[in-house]
Image: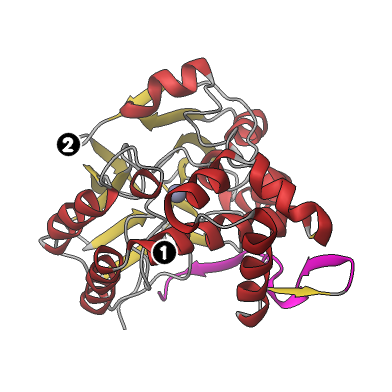
């Protein structure tokens, strides 16, 4: 079985947080992505437990969605790490533009942070005793970077490629860009890389690169054929995220909540055109069927089984 080098520790996180990838050098370490703000104390504790006395020199973000950068400020406070973001995010982070960061319109949160440097496609990093190249991976996020180590055939893929799919196609569903076409191009570029192990932004590291690519292409095709399905996918993903943060919500508040949140309103106007009480009813019924939510007469709540995982550690075997 293909192994990750001992110097690479993957903290696999549950809902709300991205994975955190720790790359260890003899005296220092680098963290890729910092999770969601609500989990920041847990992220700091998990990272501290793995540092083994090293200093955390830098934190690099694959992209600046709330579940990947929400813990940046806490990591900086705890370890003094330099923060490096994809260059495309520099103006948005500098201005802390909550609309541009998809915080304001989605009901998500993050703690404001500053950055020390930017990363661009083609930049090379020496991490965990290996050379990594940053590659651009637009689609799920137009500024996203992924990191490839050709020597050990490892890809840190963020939300551009998961074992089963990729992150939501926000630019497409919001009508501000063609995330599907960008994703297809990104997958075409990823497919040319030498890869034995993928460390995704969510879920366990995996070795079946070819099968993951095939599933990703199938998903693109399905979305191209049926854009409403893509809209539904984004709606479900974002509402599940919100429900896990809130844990429970009053059923009668849901139509107003959906109508008042830009993201859901835009999705409804573009794809569903339903009265908000019907949209809420259908969405909740969908997620109850999927085993994510349960409901009684008054409230909708997250089923305990979908609670955030505790931070499984993958070191060595992927
Ligand atoms: Zn993302």
Instruction: State yes or no: residue 311 in magenta.
Output: yes
**Left or right relative to 297: residue 24:** left
Region in magenta: 297-318
* Near-viewer residue (157 or 154): 157
Q: Are marks 1 and 2 in contact (CB under 8 Å)?
A: no
Q: Residue at x 60, y 74 (%)?
A: 286
Going from the N terminus, do you reach mark 1 or mark 2 first?
A: 1
Q: Quadrant of the C terminus?
A: bottom left
x then y, percent, for residue 203:
48, 68
Q: How many marks?
A: 2
Pick the residue in front: 61 or 233. Answer: 233
In the picture of the structure, the residue carrying the numbered disc 2 is: 122
Residue 227 part of the magenta-drawn span: no
Q: Name the one closer to the observer, 157 or 167.
A: 167
Instruction: Name the disc covering residue 6, or none.
Output: 1
Quarter of the view holding residue 291: bottom right
**Looking at the image, what colour scheme do you see?**
secondary structure
Which residue is rendered at x = 61% and y = 33% of the image?
A: 79
Q: Secondary structure at mark 2?
A: loop
Kindly tell me whether residue 290 is visible in this rendering.
yes
Question: Where, quadrant-wise, is the N terminus in this rendering?
Answer: bottom left
- Residue 209 vs 118, above or below: the answer is below
Looking at the image, residue 159 sits to the left or right of residue 71; the answer is: left
Which residue reaches farthest top? 95
Disc 1, SS: loop
Vertical position of residue 39 compared to residue 153: above or below: above
Q: Nearer the viewer, residue 269 or 227?
A: 269
Q: Is residue 22 left or right of residue 240?
A: left
Q: CA gap, disc 1 to disc 2?
A: 26 Å
State the image coordinates of residue 23 (x, y, percent, origin top left).
42, 50
Give the foreground label among 1 and 2.
Answer: 2
């Amino acid at each position: 079985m293909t192994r990750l080098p001992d110097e690479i520790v993957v903290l696999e996180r549950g809902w709300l947080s991205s994975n955190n990838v720790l790359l260890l050098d003899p005296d220092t370490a680098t963290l890729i992505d910092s999770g969601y703000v609500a989990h920041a104390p847990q992220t700091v504790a998990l990272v501290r437990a793995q540092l083994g006395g090293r200093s955390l020199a830098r934190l690099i973000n694959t992209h600046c969605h709330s579940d990947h950068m929400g813990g940046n400020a806490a990591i900086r406070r705890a370890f003094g790490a330099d923060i490096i973001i994809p260059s495309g995010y520099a103006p948005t982070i500098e201005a802390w533009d909550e609309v541009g960061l998809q915080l304001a319109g989605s009901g998500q949160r993050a703690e404001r942070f500053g950055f020390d440097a930017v990363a661009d496609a083609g930049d090379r990093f020496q991490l965990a005793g290996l050379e990594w190249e940053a590659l651009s991976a637009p689609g799920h996020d137009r500024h996203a970077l992924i990191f490839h180590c050709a020597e050990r055939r490892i890809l840190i893929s963020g939300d551009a490629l998961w074992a089963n799919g990729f992150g939501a196609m926000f630019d497409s569903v919001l009508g501000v860009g063609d995330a599907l076409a960008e994703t297809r191009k990104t997958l075409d570029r990823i497919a040319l890389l030498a890869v034995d192990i993928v460390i995704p932004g969510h879920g366990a590291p995996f070795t079946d690169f070819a099968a993951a690519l095939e599933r990703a292409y199938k998903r693109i095709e399905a979305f191209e054929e049926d854009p409403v399905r893509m809209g539904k996918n984004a709606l479900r993903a974002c509402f599940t995220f919100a429900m896990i943060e809130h844990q429970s919500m009053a059923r009668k508040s849901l139509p107003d909540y959906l109508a008042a949140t830009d993201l859901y309103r835009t999705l409804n106007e573009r794809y569903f055109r339903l009265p908000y009480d019907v949209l809420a009813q259908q969405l909740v019924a969908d997620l109850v069927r999927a085993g994510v939510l349960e409901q009684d007469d008054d409230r909708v709540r997250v089923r305990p089984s979908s609670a955030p995982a505790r931070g499984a550690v993958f070191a060595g075997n992927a």
